Image (tube, rainbow, N blue to C red):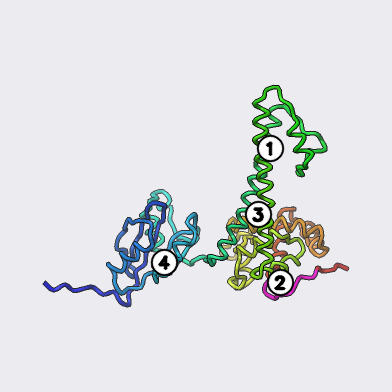
């Protein structure tokens, strides 16, 4: 009996992927028709083999949600010749029914349907080099957070055991004298002393780690890859070394943002808008954001307001117009972001304005 081999040339197979550590669920669409869900090992090569065997000659397009699995899946699909989008989960169309009846197969079909209807736009995928640099800068932030938690635990322990911190040490600067005071404390029960010893040793270790990784980041920023842009960003009032490093590693290529509006939207410094008919209402700052960069820029805005006359004047004007302090400082952060974009694209350092 003669077997006829199907040929799918000039057709497109869309695959929505719900990825997990031990298995993937793939929803397969041929053109605009849903075909089936398949359960497969967590491997781009396994899916590529299945598609080549089942739909030879077709073009393959797949997508999965951004999250804990990063970009290695996308890169491996690209190596197999499969176009792959990494999409923001918030951009995947869904209904109330999808939220009530949530399964891996249903999630995969939702992504696949979004692909078929051309409703999905892939997020920016950094180079492996840039992603590695991101990890380094983000790791410093994690260590810093661990250090803050460790300090809070020590303070909580002292409060719990009825020990008051002397006024000269009751501040955010944990000096060597304060550490010596902690180590000299005497407790009625020896286990309390042992417990505090462990906490202080953890504190000292985290401080050493923070210093070490900060030095590594400085070396990275002074390398040929970042040196010029790094010092350009530092010329903007309020932008410190770590914020500059975060901007460079998280943004990567400023030209990927066609306008300031797109950059502002990515950072999350713009207000939410609710418009209908002739009504146009702008609310609080958007919930969609780059959490770390927005936080850093708001912190930098407070510093810039104190040292830049033009921004200090702008902040005062916002307060006079009835804005509260938080809303006004967000507007200052927006100004700061505009300056950052300017020096990045122009290659010229920022010159602080003089108010006459």
**Mark 3 burial class by Cα count in 10 Å: few <14, some 14-19, many 20+:** some
Report which residue position mark 3 lands on: 213
The N terminus sits in image quarter: bottom left
- Please tell me whether mark 1 or mark 2 is closer to you in this view: 1
At x 41%, y 66%, the residue is 77
Q: Is residue 52 left or right of residue 301?
A: left
Please tell me whether mark 1 sits on a helix, a strand or a loop.
helix
Q: Nearer the viewer, residue 43 or 211?
A: 211
Q: CA distance from mark 4 to mark 3?
A: 33 Å
Q: What label sits on residue 77 in the rendered view? A: 4
Q: What label sits on residue 343 in the rendered view? A: 2
Q: Are marks 2 and 4 in contact (CB under 8 Å)?
A: no
Q: Position of residue 312 (x, y in %)?
A: 81, 60
Please tell me whether mark 3 sits on a helix, a strand or a loop.
helix
Mark with earlier residue (3, 1): 1
Q: Is residue 230 magenta?
A: no
Report which residue position mark 1 lands on: 200
Q: Position of residue 275 (x, y in %)?
A: 58, 62
Q: CA distance from mark 3 to mark 1?
A: 20 Å
Any part of residue 279 in sight: no
**Mark 2 burial class by Cα count in 10 Å: few <14, some 14-19, many 20+:** some
Q: Are marks 4 and 3 in contact (CB under 8 Å)?
A: no
At x 65%, y 54%, the residue is 213
The C terminus sits in image quarter: bottom right
Please tell me whether mark 2 sits on a helix, a strand or a loop.
helix
Name the image quarter holding residue 261: bottom right
Q: CA distance from mark 4 to mark 1?
A: 48 Å
Q: Which residues are magenta?
A: 342-351
Any part of residue 316 in sight: yes
């Amino acid at each position: 009996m003669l077997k006829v081999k199907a040929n799918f040339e000039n057709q497109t197979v869309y695959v929505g992927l719900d990825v997990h550590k031990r298995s993937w669920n793939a929803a397969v669409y041929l053109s605009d028709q849903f075909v089936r869900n398949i359960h497969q090992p967590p491997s781009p090569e396994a899916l590529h083999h299945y598609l080549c065997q089942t739909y030879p000659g077709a073009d393959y397009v797949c997508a999965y949600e951004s999250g804990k699995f990063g970009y290695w899946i996308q890169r491996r699909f690209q190596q197999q010749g499969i176009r792959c989008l990494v999409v923001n989960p918030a951009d995947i169309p869904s209904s109330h029914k999808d939220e009530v009846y949530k399964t891996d197969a249903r999630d995969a079909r939702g992504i696949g349907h979004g692909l078929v209807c051309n409703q999905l736009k892939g997020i920016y995928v950094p180079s492996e080099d840039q992603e590695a640099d991101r990890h380094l800068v983000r790791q410093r932030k994690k260590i810093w957070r661990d250090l803050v938690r460790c300090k809070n635990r020590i303070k909580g322990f002292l409060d719990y055991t009825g020990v008051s911190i002397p006024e000269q040490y009751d501040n955010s600067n944990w000096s060597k004298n304060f550490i010596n005071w902690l180590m000299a404390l005497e407790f009625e029960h020896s286990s309390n002393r042992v417990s505090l010893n462990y906490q202080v040793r953890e504190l000292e270790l985290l401080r050493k780690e923070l210093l070490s990784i900060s030095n590594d980041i400085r070396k990275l920023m002074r390398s040929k890859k970042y040196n010029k842009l790094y010092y350009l960003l530092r010329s903007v009032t309020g932008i410190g070394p770590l914020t500059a490093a975060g901007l460079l590693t998280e943004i990567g290529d400023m030209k990927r943002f066609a306008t300031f509006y797109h950059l502002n939207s990515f950072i999350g410094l713009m207000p939410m808008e609710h418009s209908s008919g002739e009504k146009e209402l702008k609310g609080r700052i958007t919930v969609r954001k780059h959490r770390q960069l927005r936080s850093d820029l708001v912190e930098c805005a407070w510093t810039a307001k104190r040292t830049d006359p033009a921004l200090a004047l702008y902040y005062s004007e916002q307060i006079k117009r009835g804005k509260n302090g938080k809303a006004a400082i967000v507007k200052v952060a927006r100004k700061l972001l505009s300056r950052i974009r300017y020096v990045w694209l122009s290659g010229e350092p920022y010159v602080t304005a003089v108010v006459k």
